[in-house]
Image (tube, rainbow, N blue to C red):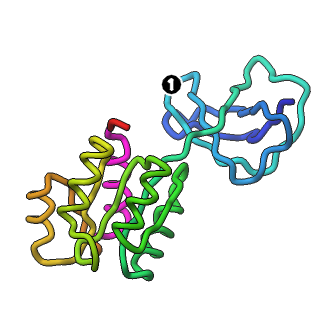
Amino acid sequence: MYFIIDQAFLCQTCAKPLHIYIEEAELPKPETNYTFSCPACASHLFLRSGAAQVIEAIPPNGILATRAPLTTIIVIDDEADIRDSMAALLQSMEGFSIRTCPSRDAALELLEQERPNLVIVDWNMPGMTLECFVELVRRRYGLLPMVLYSTAPNALAKANALAIPFMSKTDDPEKLISTIQQLCTIPHAN
């Protein structure tokens, strides 16, 4: 069955109006992410579905979109308010699935079940040291991107010593989002 999910979508790169369709067995749930390429400029685009209408067939000028794979990020912080605010910021980004962990040990358990695209980890936490965590993740999961997220005065030096990027908890949201999007595009071994 085909559905039209957007009758007036404009390409974010070339501003060409596009008619986006999907093929699903049943009516798609609202807020489902889809991906497609613009035929005019070949930009890779995302669309979050809203209301959908059933149609018989896709017209010749229609674009068939597919479900978009989610980019998964694990946020590790022992302070619930900081962990939750980072998760809320990241959930505002299209195509991202966010998992949170209150400790590095909990994160290691989660990593046994799923492979994220990025791990954001606080430095000053009880339990396993940051150095031990980074070493274990690298040994078990290869080049899985990690970033140190901290306000500690010497956190940048610590991140450099561990050869991982650094983000300050005091960075503005736009800078955080930009950094995270860049880090999520780094290919890594699973």
The residue at 48%/47% (across/down) is 71
**Main secondary structure of the magenta stretch:** helix
Residue 170, image x and y in percent? 27, 75
- Badge 1: few (under 14), some or many (20 or more) residues near its Cα, within 10 Å? few
Magenta-highlighted residues: 171-186
Percent position of residue 35, x then y:
60, 36
Q: Residue at x 50, y 60 (%)?
A: 98
In this rendering, the answer to whether 3 lies above or below 39 is below
Give the SS element for disc 1: loop
Q: Is residue 185 magenta?
A: yes
40 vs 22, left or right, is left
184 relative to 129 in the view: left or right: right
Viewer can see residue 60: yes
Q: Provide the residue designation for mark 1.
A: 42
Q: Is residue 118 above or below residue 152?
A: above
Of residues 174 and 67, the one drawn nearer to the viewer in this rendering = 67
